[in-house]
Image: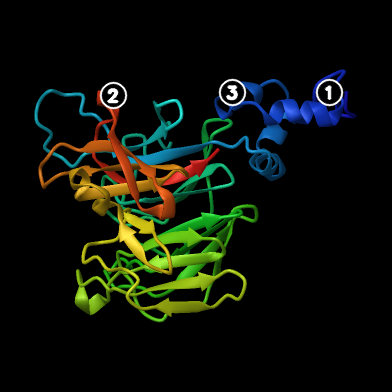
């Protein structure tokens, strides 16, 4: 026992530390919840940053799609209010669906138009509108898959919605969007999850409302968006923040689509981005796509008012569109998808 008498010093009694760590590293993420209750040391290990990167290095992490999705309506009568949203999790390997427990502060549905992102195996929800008052909120929450619990983080530095977000290596980057007076923003911030603090970055070259964020290597890209005075006039340009230099660089003609880029941007080659809506006519409207490595989950409709469909898109050589397969989705998980992200657990 350790000096406080709280736990075994050895990870697994009778096994060398290296072998015990290897055993725990090979646990599927779905078993982490039960394993975390074995002892305090296992809980601390399973939640640690080092354990996550050890699993990632050894190829034991698992990519899943997290969706901000309309919840099923319990009443048979036609709803008279906007739908409530929750977070669904799709495992493309097993084909299974699950739902994350509601936020304690918002038990009846997520803030409307909130943003989600993930880093180091944790899921983050930030911003949006209060589902009751529709007032903008600065809330930031972190979901720990190991304990299946939500924790509150430091608030956003200011009210902003429809901003770009990207995350990697324990850092979350946000840029653009608009403030509570609907003024488009050019400011950007970074959140350090370990220190639980926000730091302001240099500004982008111009305002970008309703832009989309995507992190590629050591570059945080902010794609398209529009100025305060030209709402709905989406730019063809993008700019990226170099994590190493702390500088923004602008790229012309990076977004060749006239539609809103939110949740449908697909990384291309040579600083060119395409829309997941272009992968098949079945997902042309209200498209959301999340890259899961060799495949992507793509959702959308063939036309306005058509049923929402769910598809797995295979990646062919060169990153071009491959085979697309329609999924049979349980009724509880067939609702409209507002946004999505990949979580590597």
**Disc 1: which residue:** 8
Q: Is residue 30 left or right of residue 335?
A: right
**Disc 2: which residue:** 330
**Residue most extreme to the right:** 3
Q: Which residue appears at 33% of the width and 65% of the height?
A: 211
**Disc 3: which residue:** 31
Q: Secondary structure at mark 3?
A: helix
Q: Which residue appears at 19% of the width and 69% of the height?
A: 232
**Residue 199: x and y, percent?**
56, 67
Q: Which residue appears at 23% of the width and 47% of the height?
A: 280
Mark 3 neighbour class, 10 Å CA radius: few under 14, some 14 to 19, many 20 or more: few
Query: CA–CA distance between discs 2 and 3?
Result: 23 Å
Closer to the observer: label 1 or label 3? 3
Q: Secondary structure at mark 1?
A: loop
**Residue 150: x and y, percent?**
50, 38
Mark 2 neighbour class, 10 Å CA radius: few under 14, some 14 to 19, many 20 or more: few
């Amino acid at each position: 026992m350790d000096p406080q008498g709280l736990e075994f010093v050895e990870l697994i009694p009778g096994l060398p530390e290296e072998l015990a760590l290897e055993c725990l590293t090979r646990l599927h993420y779905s078993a982490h919840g039960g394993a975390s209750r074995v002892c305090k040391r296992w809980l601390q290990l399973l939640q640690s940053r080092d354990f996550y990167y050890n699993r990632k290095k050894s190829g034991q992490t698992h990519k899943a799609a997290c969706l901000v999705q309309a919840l099923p309506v319990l009443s048979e009568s036609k709803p008279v209010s906007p739908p409530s949203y929750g977070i669904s999790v799709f495992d493309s390997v097993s084909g299974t669906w699950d739902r994350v427990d509601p936020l304690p502060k918002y038990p009846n549905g997520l803030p409307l138009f909130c943003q989600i992102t993930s880093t180091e195996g944790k899921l983050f929800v930030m911003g949006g509108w209060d589902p009751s008052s529709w007032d903008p909120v600065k809330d930031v929450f972190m979901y720990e898959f190991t304990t299946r619990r939500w924790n509150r983080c430091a608030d956003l530095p200011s009210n902003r919605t429809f901003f770009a977000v990207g995350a990697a290596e324990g850092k979350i980057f946000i840029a653009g969007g608009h403030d509570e007076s609907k003024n488009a923003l050019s400011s950007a911030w970074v959140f350090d999850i370990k220190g639980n603090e926000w730091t302001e970055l240099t500004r982008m070259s111009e305002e970008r409302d309703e832009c989309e964020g995507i992190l590629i290597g050591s570059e945080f890209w902010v794609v398209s968006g529009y100025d305060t005075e030209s709402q709905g006039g989406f730019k063809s340009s993008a700019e990226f923040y170099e994590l190493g230099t702390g500088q923004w660089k602008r790229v012309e003609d990076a977004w060749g689509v006239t539609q809103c880029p939110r949740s449908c941007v697909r990384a291309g080659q040579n600083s060119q981005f395409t829309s997941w809506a272009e992968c098949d006519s079945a997902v042309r409207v209200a498209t959301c796509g999340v890259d899961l490595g060799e495949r992507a989950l793509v959702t959308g409709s063939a036309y306005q008012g058509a049923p929402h469909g769910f598809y797995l898109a295979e990646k062919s050589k060169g990153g071009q569109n491959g085979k697309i397969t329609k999924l049979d989705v349980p009724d509880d998980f067939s609702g409209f998808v507002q946004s999505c992200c990949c979580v590597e657990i």
